[in-house]
Image (spheres, helix red, strand yellow):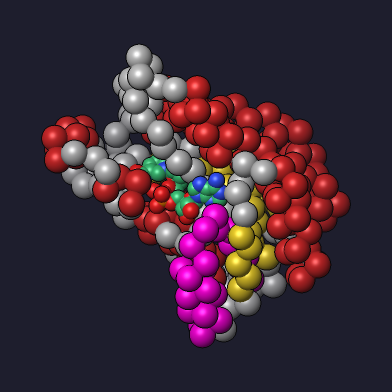
Amino acid sequence: MDVDLSEKTALVTGGTRGIGRAIVRALADAGARVAFTYRSSTEAAEALVDELEAGDTEALSLQGDVADFDTAQAHVDTVLDRWDTLDVLVNNAGITRDGLMLRLTEEDWDDVIDTNLKGVFNYAKAAYRPMMGQRSGSIVNISSVVGTSGNAGQTNYAASKSGIVGFSKSLARELGGRNVRVNVVAPGYVQTDMTDELSDDAREGILDAVPLDRLAEPEDVAQAVLYLAAPAAAYVTGHVLHVDGGLSM
Ligand code: NAD
């Protein structure tokens, strides 16, 4: 896809590995200045900044927990101080704490909701005023097939991911008049550290249900994000783009 995001600024949460890293790279390849957040992997963050700068991308890494409200505000302020605008926000950071309800703890619930759902609120809230003021912006939130289909053992994760859909559609309605678009990408099962935890049986079961007969690569998801971030999607808002090989149809 030929996308030109030169002179645009993007911020991606959880950018050092997996899907987030592929999104960072896709935005950089399209010419954007890219900031990304990470929680603890300083070495990976520094290596990614070096790699991006070697490819002539202006890059910035920001450490912090997405669940922390003030950290999100500080990250957005840092991006604005450096580059004056924030054109694209990708809320990608997410975790799983799986278990059947019988065994799921309050902590498992809170950790997942705070990271996956409150994290999206925190960064969208911080980006809200600057994007409204600019009268342009694209927010892309990463949900999951589990948010629409549900999955035994993932009540907390499914609640967070379907919460993202309701949140995004509501925000799309609030911000549409200011030309700020809010969309969702809902991946199926993607080959990352998160799915490395799947048993062989679970993996086989998933593949049986995926018409395209493979797990997604992080780049499959990144290309969908790139489309929604780009001018090509100027009339697309409040949409949930399923990138799941046909799993959820
Ligand atoms: P991953 O575990 O490989 O990466 C997650 C990233 O989020 C990491 O960089 C991690 O450091 C960051 N992160 C986690 N908690 C954080 C916190 N509190 N503060 C800051 N950063 C934090 O996972 P992934 O597979 O690349 O998943 C990325 C997103 O895609 C997640 O939202 C996930 O729910 C979603 N997703 C993944 C799959 C899949 O099959 N892998 C499927 C559907 C949706």
Q: Is residue 108 above or below residue 67?
A: above
Q: Is residue 169 left or right of residue 110?
A: right
Residue situated in front as seen by the camera: 130 or 195: 195
Residue 216: image x %, image y %?
A: 30, 49
- Count of labels in the image: 0
Q: Is residue 58 magenta?
A: no
Quadrant of the snapshot with the N terminus: bottom left
Q: Residue furthest top?
A: 102
Residue 197 falls in image quadrant: top left
Q: Which residues are magenta?
A: 33-55
Is residue 39 magenta-colored?
Answer: yes
* Residue 232, above or below 204: below
Q: Quadrant of the rendered structure where residue 141 is?
A: top right
Question: In the rendered image, is residue 127 in sight?
Answer: no
Q: Is residue 38 above or below residue 214?
A: below
Q: Say if 242 sits above or below 228 in the image.
A: above
Query: Which quarter shows the C terminus?
Result: top left
Q: Please name the residue shown 52% across and 80% down the image.
A: 50
Q: Residue at x 35, y 19 (%)?
A: 103
Q: Is residue 233 left or right of residue 198?
A: right
**Image side of residue 131 versus residue 31, left or right:** right
Residue shown at 58% from the left, 34% from the top: 114
Residue 98, horizontal then vertical, whole percent? 36, 30
Q: Position of residue 213 (x, y in %)?
A: 18, 43
Closer-to-camera residue (200/4): 200
Q: Would residue 31 be found to the left or right of residue 25 on screen? A: right
Q: Give the residue at x 24% y 40%.
A: 198
Q: Position of residue 211 (x, y in %)?
A: 22, 38
Q: Does any portion of residue 209 appear in the rendered image?
A: yes
As drawn, which residue projects farthest toward the right? Answer: 133
